[in-house]
Image (tube, rainbow, N blue to C red):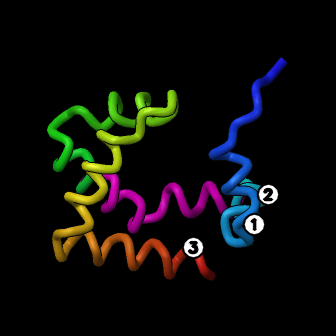
């Protein structure tokens, strides 16, 4: 039996996230977009190779490292721009 995932449940309550989660084509398009690729490159660069480990830890309830990486990226002009562009694309 699958355990409930409070993070996924919270995402489903957000109208924009729920729309994406229920539209596989839109989610695939967003994930493969240049905006997402740019953000992932910035996250990887900032993490110095530890992004996957930070994401795995976050999935297990320890988000601190991932939050730190995200904050570091968001403080850069390039990172903030990438996130803003991704938000705009997701709103379409």
Q: Nearer the viewer, residue 69 or 37?
A: 69
| Majority secondary structure of magenta residues | helix
Q: Earlier in the sequence, mark 1 or mark 3?
A: 1
Kindly state the secondary structure of the residue where label 1 is placed. Answer: helix
Is 65 situated left or right of 61 in this image? left
The single residue placed furthest to the right in the displayed view is 1
| 89 relative to 10, above or below | below
Kindly state the secondary structure of the residue where label 3 is placed. Answer: helix
Label placed on residue 22: 2
- The quadrant in which residue 56 appears is top left
Is 6 situated left or right of 36 in this image? right
- Judging by the rendered image, the residue that carries numbered circle 3 is 90
Name which residue lies at 35% across and 32% down: 52
- Point out residue 18 in the picture as x, y percentages from the top left corner: 74, 62
Look at the numbered discs 1 and 2 and tell me whether their residues touch, using CB distance below 8 Å: yes
- What is the distance, in whole Å, between disc 1 and disc 2 at their CAs? 5 Å
- What is the distance, in whole Å, between disc 1 and disc 3 at their CAs? 10 Å
Q: Earlier in the sequence, mark 2 or mark 3?
A: 2
Kindly state the secondary structure of the residue where label 2 is placed. Answer: loop
Q: Is residue 26 magenta?
A: yes
Label placed on residue 19: 1
Query: How many neighbours does mark 3 have within 10 angstroms: few (below 14), some (14-19), or many (20 or more)?
Result: some
- Point out residue 3 in the picture as x, y percentages from the top left corner: 76, 25
Q: Which residues are magenta?
A: 25-41
């Amino acid at each position: 039996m699958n355990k409930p995932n409070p993070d996924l449940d919270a995402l489903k309550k957000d109208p924009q996230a729920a729309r994406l989660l229920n539209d596989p084509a839109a989610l695939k398009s967003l994930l493969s977009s240049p905006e997402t690729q740019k953000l992932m490159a910035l996250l990887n660069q900032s993490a110095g190779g530890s992004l996957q480990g930070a994401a795995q830890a976050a999935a297990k309830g320890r988000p601190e490292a991932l939050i730190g990486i995200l904050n570091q990226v968001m403080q850069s002009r390039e990172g903030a721009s990438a996130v803003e562009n991704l938000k705009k694309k997701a709103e379409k």
